[in-house]
Image (cartoon, helix red, strand yellow):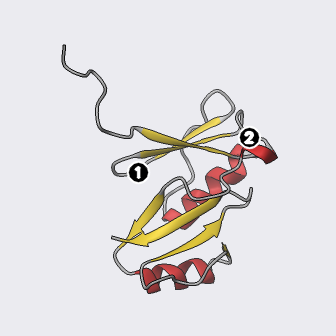
């Protein structure tokens, strides 16, 4: 029997305390309209290319946030991405490291990363 498990990541769930606020924040930094439907009063599927992101307020707990980035968002220009996030007032945790990536936090304190790929 062949292995039925695909070598793909389908989606990443991010714990958020307030689904509407999180939807608006993530859509803003990604340049998306925040008009998608919130499912079951606790889920928001961000329209992404490739691996998906689902914001989930049902799994949120202060102990359950990402203390280290579980994934990174891609950019083609790390310096422009850093300045963009800085201009948006995002909580930047690091400067651009090794000319390649930086870390930041969402409003709930989830540690995230943007990396030049």
Q: Please provide percent x and percent y for residue 101.
A: 47, 75
User: What percent of the width, then of the height, locates residue 54?
Assistant: 54, 42
Give the camera-side residue of 25 and 71.
71
Q: Residue furthest front?
A: 1
In the picture as drawn, the residue positioned furthest to the right comes out as 62
Q: Residue at x 64, y 61 (%)?
A: 111
Q: Residue at x 52, y 81 (%)?
A: 82
Q: Which residue is disc 1 drawn over?
A: 48
Quarter of the C terminus within the rendering? bottom left
Mark 1 and mark 2 lie on one chain; the one further toward the N terminus is 1
Identify the residue position indicated by label 2 in the image: 60
**Crowd class of label 1 (few under 14; some 14 to 19; many from 20; radius 10 Å):** few
Local SS, label 2: loop
Task: Name the quadrant of the N terminus.
Answer: top left
**Residue 3's spot in the image, x, y percent?**
24, 22
Report whether 100 appears left or right of 1.
right
The structure residue drawn at horizontal position 52% and vertical position 56%, both measured from the top left corner, is 33
């Amino acid at each position: 029997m062949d292995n039925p498990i695909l070598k793909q990541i389908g989606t990443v769930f991010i714990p958020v305390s307030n689904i509407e606020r999180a939807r608006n924040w993530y859509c803003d930094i990604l340049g998306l309209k925040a008009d998608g439907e919130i499912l079951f009063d606790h889920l928001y599927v961000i329209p992404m290319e490739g691996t998906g992101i689902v914001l989930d307020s049902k799994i949120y707990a202060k102990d359950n946030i990402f203390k280290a980035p579980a994934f990174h968002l891609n950019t083609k220009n790390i310096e422009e991405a850093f300045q963009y996030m800085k201009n948006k007032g995002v909580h930047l945790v690091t400067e651009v490291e090794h000319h390649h990536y930086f870390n930041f936090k969402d409003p709930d304190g989830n540690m995230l990363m943007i990396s030049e790929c």
